[in-house]
Amino acid sequence: MGRQLIRAGLVLLLVLVVVLSGCRFLPGSRQPSGQTQGTQEQLPPGKANILTMLGADPPTLDPHLTTDATSASYIVEIFSGLVTFNKDLQIVPDIAERWDVSPDGKTYTFYLRKNAKFHNGKQVTARDFKYSIERAADPRTQSTVADTYLGDIVGVKEMLNGQARQVRGVKVVDDYTLQIEIDAPKVYFLAKLTYPTAFVVDKENVESGRNWMFRPNGTGPFKLREWRVGERLVLERNENYYLGAPKLERAIFILSGGSAMTMYENNEIDITGVGIDDIERVLDPNSPLRKELVVANSFSVGYIGFNVTKPPFDDRNVRLALSYAVDKDKLAEVVLRKFVDPAYGILPPGFPGYNPNLTGLKFDPQRAKQLLAQSRYGTNLPAITLTIPGTAGNPPRTTSAIIEMWRQNLGIEVQVQQVEWATFLDDLKRYRYQAFELGWIADYPDPQNFLDILFHSQSLDNTTRYSNPEVDRLLEQARTEQDPQRRIQLYQQVEQTIIQDAPWIPLTFGKEYVLVKPWVKNYVVSPIIIPVLKDVVVEPH
């Protein structure tokens, strides 16, 4: 979901978008080491309707705290909300079977399904949704995304700021009717409700103790059967799911690591993403793996972000110089072997608002040197540290290549700092980094999810601290613009301005290369995170 994703340049959107190197922003609470949920029986390989994959430990399974794609990929299977996206990325009913919108576009009335129940069999009511929205907006919850995804609802900001004890824009009409009032007509509001921050949780479950998320009483198509940190996570079918029991009996995620390709070729796992070192072999027409490969674009972008309040990146010329000094075509074609596409803008190809005519910052080392000389720092730059998520060791090939380009083209030496994923996200939200390498995957197909959330000066997800009054004005105008064409024009104008201000160096647009065993049916590789497991069938093999 506008989730911070990947190490920039390597968009490996593995199964369910469980990206082993991490994803979006702040992880929320962290699980205690060794915590276990459920049983641990061994399952025979090749059993029908049991899907096995490599996975990663989620930083959280609390829907109201999730900000990363790893967590979200599990959460959308365990929990659910009023609306969701189908596989064609259309907003469709979920727990709300239908809804009405007032003539002024500001009041939504949702009619809940009467057969919607929590995993323990308890009925879901409008009061559960009111509790959930107010829990997300409660300052004690410390959700870093409640303002971003629920802030349009009247009263949410007041509650987040400690000025109210409930959200006045959320009203329970009766057990199965919920009314939500927003501050202005916004065409993307329903899409925001697909984000986990708007998912329903069970109050009794949440208040049962700090480790409640190891025993989540969700409403989604799957229950959490087992979570052994660092070992495995198992989801099992919710027989009483309100849209019908999933076909898949269980999904097993191996968290202990291993060689994905070796495990796939040995039939130990059923689905895997393909890494850059294996892609040529897999793409070979003579490879037996070629017919099992699914290739799709991802609505994601890898980038380097600059904190524009920290020297030397408080000087636009320095940011531009470093941008012009990066050869993105070489990065994509040579370093990453055409595994991704070079990015000169922010919105990815195929995404609403994508501008093929955008003027990007093409590789120009002479221009880079001129801009650096014109900056107030000249060649006397303060020490620069680029922070990336990961454990200590050799930096990824993309990072190393970019560092070398800066050294060769500008004579700048940049140090690389690697930080454990959860800590990285915590510190990122506290603006502690001078420069960082990361990525973003869309939550919903609307340019607001990239440009407004990441670059409006008042957005809590603006981790570069970028501020441009004209950009703010245009973004605020686009929020309520009802004419689709005019709205896209506003966003394209914003994107062009941001590129010229260079708080980011966009590097790559992501692609997904996923191997799927022939006995796995109905598995969909989606460009954004949506529930995908409920229709999967695993045939005997």
Image (cartoon, helix red, strand yellow):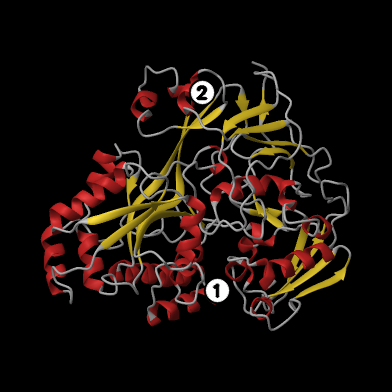
Report which residue position mark 1 lands on. Answer: 482
Q: Is 25 placed above or below 481 here?
A: above
Whether residue 34 is visible to the viewer of this picture, yes or no, is yes
Give coordinates of residue 333: x percent, y percent.
Answer: 26, 40
Q: What residue type is labelled 2?
A: Met
> Badge 2 is on which residue?
263
Quarter of the figure with the N terminus: bottom right
| In front of the other: 226 or 200 | 226
Position of 389 with respect to 263 (left or right) is left
Q: Distance between the residues labelled 2 and 1?
A: 50 Å
Three-letter amino acid code at the position of disc 1 = Gln
Query: Residue 129's x, y, as percent?
Result: 78, 63
At horizontal 65% and vertical 76% (from top left) the residue drawn is 160
Q: Is residue 447 in view from this perspective?
A: no
Relative horizontal placement of residue 475, taking residue 341 as reference (left or right): right
Against 8, residue 447 (above or below) is below
Residue 22, horizontal then vertical, whole percent: 49, 47
Q: Do the residues labelled 2 and 1 touch (CB within 8 Å)?
A: no
Image quadrant in which you'd find residue 412: bottom left
Residue 347 position in % (x across, y down): 41, 58
- In this rendering, would 314 be left or right of 470? left
